[in-house]
Image (spheres, rainbow, N blue to C red):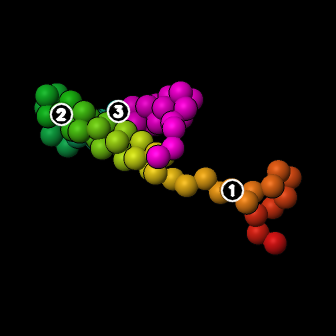
Amino acid sequence: MAKVSKASLRSIFLVSLTASIFAGLIAYGGMRDVSRAFIAAVIAFGVFFLGALLLTIFSKADEDVKPGKPRLS
C-alpha cells in the first residue's frame, strides 16, 4: 500500500467538500427539506472522500518515468 501525503489528503478533502455542497444544494432544490438535503450532502461527502482515498492508496506509481522525457514516444 502507498502512503498518502498531507497535501493529497487536503486536496481530497476539499474536492469532497465541494462535491457534497453541490449535492446538498441539488437535494435541497429538489426536496425543499433541509434535513434531507444535509443527509444527502453527508452521504455524498463520504462516498467521494472514501472513493478518492481508495483510488489514491491503491494507485501504482510508474517507476519508468524519467524527468524531462515524455512517457509516450
Q: What distance separates the C-alpha of mark 3 from that of mark 2?
A: 11 Å
Q: Residue at 16%, 28% (x, y): give it.
A: 34
Q: Secondary structure at mark 3?
A: helix
Which of the 4 image quadrants contains residue 44?
Answer: top left
Task: Pick the quarter of the image with the C terminus.
Answer: bottom right
Q: Is residue 65 above or below residue 30?
A: below
Q: Residues within 10 Å of mark 3 (few under 14, many from 20)?
A: some
Name the spot of residue 36 as percent of width and height, x first.
14, 34
Q: Residue at 46%, 51% (x, y): give it.
A: 58
Q: Which residue is mark 3?
A: 21
Name the spot of residue 22 as percent of width and height, x first.
36, 38
Q: Which residue is mark 2?
A: 39
Q: Earlier in the sequence, mark 3 or mark 2?
A: 3
Q: Residue furthest right?
A: 68
Q: Which residue is mark 1?
A: 63
Q: Residue at 48%, 32% (x, y): give it.
A: 9
Q: What distance separates the C-alpha of mark 1 from that of mark 3?
A: 37 Å
Asked if residue 15 is among those painted magenta in the image, a careful observer would answer: yes
Residue closest to the eye, 62 or 45? 62
> Which amino acid, mark 2?
Ile
Which of the 4 image quadrants contains residue 30?
Answer: top left
Q: Earlier in the sequence, mark 1 or mark 3?
A: 3
Asked if residue 28 is among those painted magenta in the image, a careful observer would answer: no
> Which amino acid, mark 3?
Ile
From which residue to which does the magenta span run?
Answer: 1-19
Q: Residues within 10 Å of mark 2 (few under 14, many from 20)?
A: some
Of the two numbered discs 1 and 2 in the rendering, the one whose residue sits closer to the viewer: 1
**Left or right: residue 4 compared with residue 33:** right
Judge whether residue 11 can be spotted in this image: no
Q: What distance separates the C-alpha of mark 1 from that of mark 2?
A: 42 Å
Residue closest to the eye, 39 or 58? 58
